[in-house]
Image (cartoon, helix red, strand yellow):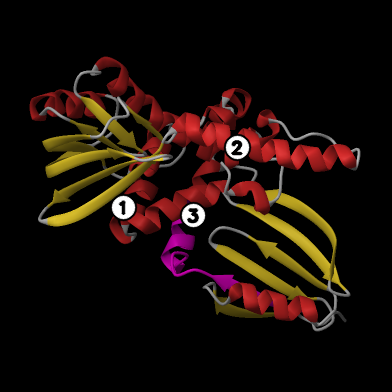
Amino acid sequence: MAKRQKVITCKLDKDFPKILDSFINLGTPIEVGLGKYSSYIFEKYTNTKYKFLTKLQTKKTFIGYVKILKDLKRDKVSVILSDLKDNIKESNNTYFDYGKAETKEYNNAVCVDLNSAYLQALFNLELITVETKNWIEKYLSKTERLVCVGMLAKRKEILTFSNKQIRTEKINENKYRFIFNAVIQEVAGVMNKVSLHHTEDFIAYWVDGVYLKNEYIAFDVAQQFEKAGFPCKIEYLENFKAKVNYSHITYTYNKDNKFKILEIPIIHVHANRQREILSVINSKRIEKNLAKVTMKTIQRKKFTQGLLSLT
């Protein structure tokens, strides 16, 4: 009879790299799974799995995620999923935009912020029930809601080690990753309409909040969001400033008497840096007669965790 696997739950924190290194240096066969919010180390000889979780992956987060998965298995959703899988491309994901890249003081500004944007997008796409949506909104914090929906996109790099060396490596992706991409694009769609139709008043948008110069335009924008199925709120900002740095635009402001900072990447600077990094990588690949990495393969995410931070 096979020995039952022992599972030990640990915190995923700054000490994890040292812990991982110590396991590798033992030289015994292990399997390692590396993810954004969770990782694991599996000792084959002892049949013990050490699960490392961040504080963002709470019990409630998992319950919410299970409710979403249950809704996705409904018969009426299958046609929607098939259509999304055929038409949604991850390379079309956008999370931010900005108007003029300039250093400027706007004094007062406003932010129209979507309520539970990604969760609402799932509901608008008819992928979850109103009961699931209401439960997640009631019991999960804003950060927990983001993690809950984000679990649809989870990806783990799986590596096996023995004698202190990597033997195999592969990427495991959630089969529902395309749904998370659809959610991102659903939210970006309403944000991009604002940047296109209100060019004079548009400052920037970041994920689920759009920054505007004009308080009165904000009411029109809020109405547009509500009409598109996204409840929202208007936040009033003071002492709003934009400063252009080499690779980012830094926005600083006060909201409810609290100082806030938002940094948005300057697109062409990061694109150039990415091309330079790819050039270095490909020069090594050519020497070993390995296939080149292109911007297209980067967008498809066919690479290891070492390059994930580039996108």
- Give residue 137's mark: 1
Left or right: residue 110 compared with residue 210? left
Please, is residue 115 above or below residue 104 in the view? Answer: below
Q: CA distance from mark 2 to mark 1?
A: 38 Å
Q: Which residue is located at x 42 percent, y 36 percent?
A: 95
Work out whether mark 2 precedes mark 1 in sequence or the reverse, and give the earlier one: 1
Work out whether mark 3 precedes mark 2 in sequence or the reverse, and give the earlier one: 3
Please, is residue 273 above or below residue 138 in the view? Answer: above
**Quarter of the image with the N terminus in it:** bottom right
Give the residues drawn in magenta, as a range.
48-67
**Quarter of the image with the C terminus in it:** top right
The residue wearing badge 2 is 274
Between circles 3 and 2, the one closer to the viewer is 2
Q: Which residue is located at x 74 percent, y 79 percent?
A: 23
Q: Is residue 78 visible?
A: no
Please, is residue 292 above or below residue 3 in the view? Answer: above
Type of the residue with mark 2? Gln
Residue 47 pos. (x, y %): 79, 79
Type of the residue with mark 3? Tyr
Q: Element under label 2?
A: helix
Q: Is residue 52 magenta?
A: yes
Q: Element under label 1?
A: helix
Q: Residues within 10 Å of mark 1 (few under 14, many from 20)?
A: some
Q: Is residue 150 visible?
A: yes
The residue wearing badge 3 is 65
Looking at this rendering, what residue extends furthest in the front direction? 246
